[in-house]
Amino acid sequence: MSNRTQIAIIGAGPGGYPAAFLAADLGLEVALIDPEDYPGGVCLYRGCIPSKALLHTAKVIAEANHFKELGVTFSKPKIDLDKLRGWKNDVVQKLVGGLGVLSKQRKINYIQGRAAFLDSKTLEIDKSDGTKDTLEFEKAVIATGSRPTEIPSFPNDSPHLLNSTSALDLPDIPKTMLVVGGGYIGLELGTVYAALGTKVSVVEMTDGLMQGADRDLVRVLQKSSEKIFETTMLNTKVVDMKETKSGIRVKFEGKDLEDEEVQYDKVLVSVGRSPNSEELGLENTDVEVNEKGFINIDEQRETTDRNIFAIGDVAGEPMLAHKATHEGRMVAEVLAGRNVAFDPAAIPAVVFTDPEIAWCGLTETQARVNKTNYKVARFPWGASGRATTLDRNDGVTKLIIDPKTDRVLGMGIVGTGAGELIAEGVLAIEMGALASDLELTIHAHPTLSETVMESAEVYYGLSTHMYKPKRDR
Ligand code: FAD
């Protein structure tokens, strides 16, 4: 391997590999360093992709079950866990293998190993073949991502205690499981295990699931969760966990508890993610981190060390793959000498539960906190033809609008397929669209996308399928 490179990118997740690919496409010499065989990062190996493959299975099982009510009965599914796990692993291998080919085609120097800074111009690489090497660079990009946060007082080495990584390995289908943490990762993985036959309970310390999302959207999910999960304990804290022969005994503290101590076969801890900024030798550079360990960056993702940039989960919230990718591509342009900055008008967030929740731009919760003047227009899916054909009227599409200009500031959706629908909101916000632009755009019938158009019609009091008093356009 050449011991010098123009650009060194540490970490080949959805931040690092798009940065490397675009930097190479723009004519730069790139080394990409990661411990895995191929690029992909957490998202492909142990995050977005395997979880969505399993959630697809969960959705099919739930839909087959639901059809009983519509007059079509399927027999109870038989789960061949080895085959299911194998299929999920194949999905991952197909995608990471493709990235390996794309990396080679671009003549990227892919180095399998772990890197740490010796100084602001040199990396030491602990290679996967057991050898060590140094690599000098002109500019480096840290894209080392994040890992599940552990709670030190929990029995973290117990086989009964899972995190998102071990839960995705599908070691078995336990009879009972507790999910600690009502955020998106816990709810998504809880949904998978519940579909496979586990009795899943969820415990959340705050007063609601999915903090950060608007409560009217979460209420719909919370209602459907009653059918999916055995119990959802809100305002409840796990104060102790003890390993037993067959599982983990959990002690709770909170109001309205049925039992203060319960034994579960498995406990899945999903209480957040911590940035991978330690063990990078940052003390040998001028890179600074904040009190939570996230690397401090500016709008071009330059750190406090002029030679070093940081992107993705390690550089702060929102910890989402598409945010990492956008930053990665932007940094590649900066490295190629272009004057660009990270300045999105909207970053979508999707929770792939049943129903899905998706939002982008301004939420009502933020609008209230910031005292932003806004109007909200809601279109309930009870009035949607497409939602009715799917027997999925449990949805709402809403727009958050600036009443002075009619500009779309935010969009929130709860309902089946919300994750696909939110793209229209992101584009509307990025393009500075007015509610009237959405209202006057023809949407195909019968589709769920019509609910976006009709929520704009609701804003003007002119919805075909909902009567509301008029407002001037
Ligand atoms: P990562 O994907 O974490 O990749 C970092 C890479 O750097 C890793 O391969 C790591 O091994 C490597 N690395 C670390 N240290 C070093 C070192 N010293 N030297 C070399 N390499 C190193 N996001 C979404 O947007 N949508 C979803 O649906 C979604 N679902 C998720 C589901 C689960 C279960 C989990 C856990 C996460 C999910 N996420 C999802 C979050 C998403 O995975 C992350 O936001 C995303 O992977 C961050 O990308 P990244 O490039 O910053 O880092």
Image: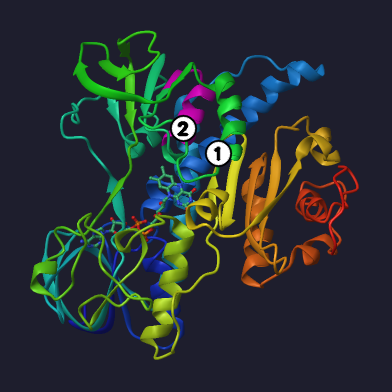
Secondary structure under tag 1 reads helix
Counting from the top left corner in percent of width and height, residue 329 is at 45, 74
Could one spot residue 104 in this view of the protein? no
The residue pinned by badge 2 equals 208
The residue pinned by badge 1 equals 215
Q: Which residues are magenta?
A: 186-201
- Magenta segment main secondary structure: helix
Q: Which residue is nearer to you in this view: 101 or 191?
A: 191
As measured in the structure, the alpha-carbon distance from the residue carrying label 2 to the one carrying label 1 is 8 Å
Query: In the displayed structure, would residue 369 be above or below residue 204?
Result: below
Label disc, if present, on residue 308 of the rendered structure: none
* Sequence-wise first label, 2 or 1: 2
Q: Quadrant of the C terminus?
A: bottom right
Secondary structure under tag 2 reads loop
Counting from the top left corner in percent of width and height, residue 400 is at 65, 55
Name the side, left or right, on which 161 lies relative to 199.
Answer: left
Tell me whether circle 2 and circle 1 mark residues in contact (CB < 8 Å): yes
Q: Indicate the amino acid at tag 2.
A: Gly
Whether 191 is among the magenta residues is yes
Name the side, left or right, on which 283 lies relative to 207.
Answer: left
Query: In the displayed structure, would residue 195 be above or below residue 35?
Result: above
Q: Which residue is nearer to you in this view: 92 or 433?
A: 433
Q: Residue furthest right?
A: 464
